Image (cartoon, helix red, strand yellow):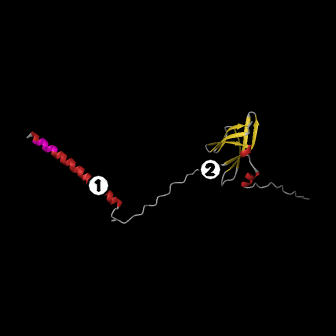
Amino acid sequence: MRTHDMTRRLGWVLGVALAGFAAAQETNSYEVIAKRNLFGLRPVTENPVTAPPPQSDWKPPPDLKITGMVVLPPVKKVSLYSIEHGKPPKSYVLGEGEEAGEIKVVTIDAKNETVRIKNRDVFVVLDFKTHGLKPTDILAGPLPLPLVAAPAVDRQ
């Protein structure tokens, strides 16, 4: 009687487990077809318009020109002209290790007349031959107002 009881319990447990497994298989096996709308039973919905991926906010670094260099030991300074698209040009006078905004002077080599700059996390070596300020560079920016002396008025 004991083996018959054990067999019955084992059969009952296996039956419940298989029924649960079969029920899980039946509900999941055909859902894919319904989701794909394979037979066109539901109206077709357009894919919602997704927003385009955000544009990168990266802008090119400003073009730097050397306008002068002063080396009087222990002072080393360089005069820079920054030309950035869409903005008025700016002038800087910086020494070694000094920075203004995203422009940092790393080293000034007076012997070779070069300056190593960190410009928006990009290291650049500037020299007067290739990065010296030319008259056409100045004209690219807004022209400064000329200084005009007022005429003398004779009050007698």
Q: Nearer the viewer, residue 99 or 126?
A: 126
Q: Please report the residue visible at 9 percent of the width from the left and 39 percent of the height from the top.
A: 2
Look at the image and tell me in which quarter the N terminus lies. top left
Q: Nearer the viewer, residue 4 or 142?
A: 4
Label placed on residue 60: 2
Q: Nearer the viewer, residue 60 or 39?
A: 39
Residue 111 vs 34, above or below: the answer is above
* 113 to the left or right of 102: right
**Disc with the residue nearer the chain's start (1 vs 2):** 1
From the image, give the main secondary structure of the stretch colored magenta: helix
Q: Position of residue 77 (x, y in %)?
A: 73, 39
Q: Please report the residue visible at 76 percent of the width from the left and 51 percent of the height from the top.
A: 135
Residue 127 vs 34, above or below: the answer is above
* 111 to the left or right of 39: right
Residue 130 vs 146, above or below: the answer is above
Report how many numbered discs are placed on residues in the image.
Answer: 2
Q: Position of residue 63 (x, y in %)?
A: 67, 48
Q: Nearer the viewer, mark 1 or mark 2?
A: 1
Q: What type is the residue that disc 2 sits on?
A: Pro
Residue 6 is covered by the magenta coloring: yes
Circle 1 SS class? helix
Name the residue carrying label 1: 29
Circle 2 SS class? loop
* 54 to the left or right of 31: right
Q: What type is the residue that disc 1 sits on?
A: Ser
* 52 to the left or right of 43: right
Q: Position of residue 156 (x, y in %)?
A: 92, 59
What range of the chain is rendered magenta?
A: 4-10
Q: Quadrant of residue 27?
A: bottom left
Residue 37 is covered by the magenta coloring: no
Residue farthest toward the right in the current orientation of the protein: 156
